[in-house]
Image (spheres, rainbow, N blue to C red):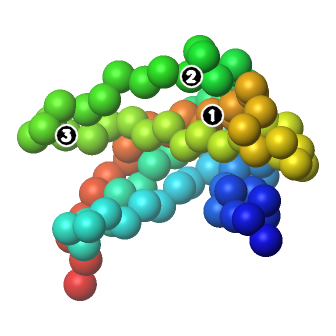
């Protein structure tokens, strides 16, 4: 069902706690390990981000999903944002 798609992809975000590890693989077969530093709930108009400039080292990540988590209104006004700091990066095997 179309309304289940956004919820299923980001459903793990609600279970993350400060200090938890998040591992992300990129298109260049590098694995990046992050540690969650905080989370916040904001209005979608207040969830803007500064984008990383090309060639600069990635040091933070923000994962965003709709809020409340069980809402059927996937275009609703609130967002849940998880912030995390880079711990390390390594090339895949």
Q: CB of mark 3 within 8 Å of CB of mark 2? A: no
Q: Earlier in the sequence, mark 1 or mark 3?
A: 3
Tag 2–tag 1 contact (CB < 8 Å) = yes
Q: Position of residue 26 (x, y in %)?
A: 31, 63
- Residue highlighted by disc 1: 81
The residue sitting at 78% across, 59% down in the picture is: 3
- Foreground residue among 13 and 93: 13
Mark 1 surroundings: few (<14), some (14-19) or many (≥20) residues within 10 A: many
Q: Earlier in the sequence, mark 3 or mark 2?
A: 2
> Dot 2: what SS?
loop
Query: For residue 73, what is the image quadrant?
Result: top right
Disc number lying in front (2 or 1): 2
Q: Which residue is mark 2?
A: 47
Mark 3 — residue?
57
Q: Is residue 24 left or right of residue 40?
A: left
Mark 1–mark 3 Cα distance, whole angstroms, equals 21 Å
For image coordinates 65% across by 62% down, the residue present is 9
Which disc number belongs to residue 41? none
Give the quadrant of the N terminus: bottom right
Q: In what quadrant of the picture does the C terminus appear?
A: bottom left
Q: Within the image, what quadrant is residue 68 found in?
A: top right
Does residue 13 show up? yes
Question: Please, is residue 83 above or below residue 45 in the view?
Answer: below
Residue at 72% x, 38% y is: 75
Tell me which corner region of the image, top left, top right, bottom left or bottom right, holds residue 77. top right
Q: Tell me how far mark 2 sits from mark 1, CA to CA.
A: 8 Å
Mark 3 falls on what kind of element? loop
């Amino acid at each position: 069902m179309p309304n289940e798609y956004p919820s299923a992809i980001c459903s793990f975000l609600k279970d993350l706690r400060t200090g938890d590890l998040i591992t992300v693989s990129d298109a260049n077969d590098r694995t990046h390990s992050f540690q969650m530093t905080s989370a916040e709930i904001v209005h979608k108009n207040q969830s803007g981000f500064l984008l990383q400039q090309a060639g600069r080292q990635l040091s933070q990540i923000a994962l965003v999903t709709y809020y409340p988590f069980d809402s059927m209104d996937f275009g609703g006004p609130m967002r849940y944002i998880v912030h995390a700091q880079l711990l390390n990066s390594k090339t895949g095997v």
